[in-house]
Image (spheres, rainbow, N blue to C red):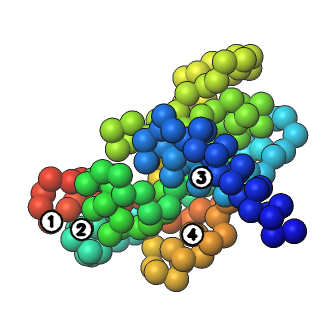
Amino acid sequence: MKKFFFIVVIFGGALLFFHFKDKNKAEIIEEVRSWMSAKKRYPPGILVEDLPQIGRIRSQKTWTKGNYTVTPVAQFHAQCRVLQKWVDLKSTEFQRQLLELGRVEAALGWGPASDQDVVDHIVFYWQQGWYSWKLTNGFNDKYPWPKIHANMCYARLVGEPEIEQRLVQSLGVGDLIEIDGTLINAVHSNGQWGFT
């Protein structure tokens, strides 16, 4: 049995080596993370009909988090689908500094961007420190590209440490979630990094 296990480990290691040999470290980490996060699937059709609601802020009192000055901009309520989730990305100086705000980043979608037919053809990737996405070959143009793009957003989820830890552990790709929160502006003390 031990001999069989050893052979399987070597074979599996060889397969992984050839799969990853032409990829950089960030691409490997992102791919392994995507393997580890089981994506929920749904029947075709729009799962989240309503657009996010943005309202007037109750208080514009600023606070600090790490080296950031945080200013509330608007109240925010949304039902959405988690299209992708990233935790602790550190591949650029910008991302390392943003970890002071929060560890969890997510791509969120509603309307056409919550439809399984669309989600099956979206590929997320990082390009020079920013998330981007594209539609794979074979997408049947059920919705025009601008309509999909207008119904998704990138979010860094900022919260107290215990809330952040729950997000790290339980927020999954494909989850249907409801968010009540505040949209913020965050400016780094060096004045170089701003984030909305």
2 or 4: mark nearer the eye: 4
Q: Nearer the viewer, residue 71 or 56?
A: 71
Which residue matches tag 1? 189
Q: Earlier in the sequence, mark 1 or mark 2?
A: 2
Question: Among all residues in the image, which is located at the extreme left?
Answer: 190
Relative image position of residue 129 (x, y in whole percent): 35, 44
Which residue matches tag 4? 168
| Residue contact at pointers 1 and 2, CB within 8 angstroms | yes
Q: Is residue 4 above or below residue 139?
A: below
Q: Earlier in the sequence, mark 3 or mark 1?
A: 3
Q: Characterize the local packing of mark 2: few (<14), some (14-19) or many (20 or more) Cα atoms within 10 angstroms.
A: many
Q: Amino acid at mark 3?
A: Val
Which residue matches tag 2? 68
Q: Is residue 134 above or below residue 5?
A: above
Q: Amino acid at mark 1?
A: Ser
Relative image position of residue 40 (x, y in whole percent): 78, 51
